[in-house]
Image (cartoon, rainbow, N blue to C red):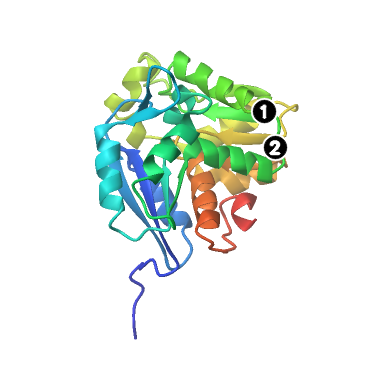
Amino acid sequence: MLQNDNWGSRARIGMFIVGSEAVPEAEWWAMLPANVSVHAARISASAPWARWKENRTAVDLADDLAHGAQQFAAMRLSAVVIGHSSSSFVGGKGWDEAVVKNLSHMFSADVTVTTNGLDTLAALRASGVRRPYLVLPPWFNDKTVAAGVRYYEDHGFEPAGHLRYVPGPEWRDLPPGDLYGHGMGFAQEVDTLHTQISASCPTAADGVLIAGTGFRCVAILDSLEQGLKRPVLSANQISLWHCLRLAGVQSDITGYGNLLGM
């Protein structure tokens, strides 16, 4: 009797993630359908992970990103995703397409490259959401929060508001940029996040978008959808959904929001 070994016989997906984060892989493995595997390359560069050239017509890849792509190119992957909301936000309109064009030259023609930004745009459209309530991690500073709101406005959406999650009292004296370094990434409370989203979601919002691949939240997506009666999308859920579609994998995944059943 053979036991499951998580071999990606249906698809293998490569994911670039922040070097110090554990959430992306944990959430992906929780949601993955059978015979699909995920493989991570860790990036230590600051956002965005590819810098615009002076004329903003092309980008230069961070060394970690280029090195990871070289390794991924030998792994017979089905799709590759830059799992970093902040890079898409800070890079701004056109950045996703520019970095995909650059990276795609490093892979064979049958490997599709995407970004978390492109994934969210596809998921919002597929879910019929035009006025998302944007929920952001507490470690996003004011500049990154503003960049996130502007990103969706620049792509034709009308955010109905935004929430930067408010951590517990033990964290409130720290500025956003210091939270992750003091361990908050490993002390996230999804119950409190659920309460804050449920209490603050505006009636004008036709859906909720939880950004940030390091922001732990997939455990509450189903419950939020049932309570709010609206689509609830999250960064890791969205990128998994989009990568499965790009890889041609049809799978009805339950328990993590209606998107994964589309």
Disc 1 on helix, strand or loop? loop
Q: Is residue 31 left or right of residue 120?
A: left
Please state which of residues 78 and 47 is positioned toward the viewer in this rendering: 78
Whether residue 205 is situated above or below residue 115 in the rendered picture: above
Query: Is residue 149 in view?
Result: yes
Q: Which residue is mark 2?
A: 129
Residue that lies at the very extreme toward the right in this rendered image: 204
Name the residue rendered at 40%, 70% in the picture.
9
Disc 2 on helix, strand or loop? loop
Q: Which residue is mark 1?
A: 157
Q: CA distance from mark 1 to mark 2?
A: 8 Å
Callout 1: few (<14), some (14-19), or many (20+) C-alpha neighbours within 10 Å?
some
Amino acid type of the residue that numbered disc 2 sits on in the rendered structure: Val
Whether residue 249 is situated above or below residue 205 in the rendered picture: below
Q: Nearer the viewer, mark 1 or mark 2?
A: 1
Please state which of residues 58 and 140 is positioned toward the viewer in this rendering: 58
Query: Is residue 19 in view?
Result: no
Name the residue rendered at 51%, 33% in the picture.
211
Q: Is residue 195 left or right of residue 46?
A: right
Callout 2: few (<14), some (14-19), or many (20+) C-alpha neighbours within 10 Å?
many
Of the 4 image quadrants, the one containing the C terminus is bottom right
Please state which of residues 131 and 195 is positioned toward the viewer in this rendering: 131
Q: Quadrant of residue 254?
A: bottom right
Amino acid type of the residue that numbered disc 1 sits on in the rendered structure: Phe
Give yes or no for contact between labels 1 and 2 (Cβ–Cβ under 8 Å): yes
Image coordinates for residue 14, horizontal then vertical, percent: 37, 51
Q: Earlier in the sequence, mark 1 or mark 2?
A: 2
Please state which of residues 91 and 253 is positioned toward the viewer in this rendering: 91
Image coordinates for residue 157, horizontal then vertical, percent: 67, 28
Image coordinates for residue 106, horizontal then vertical, percent: 33, 47
Q: Quadrant of residue 77?
A: bottom left
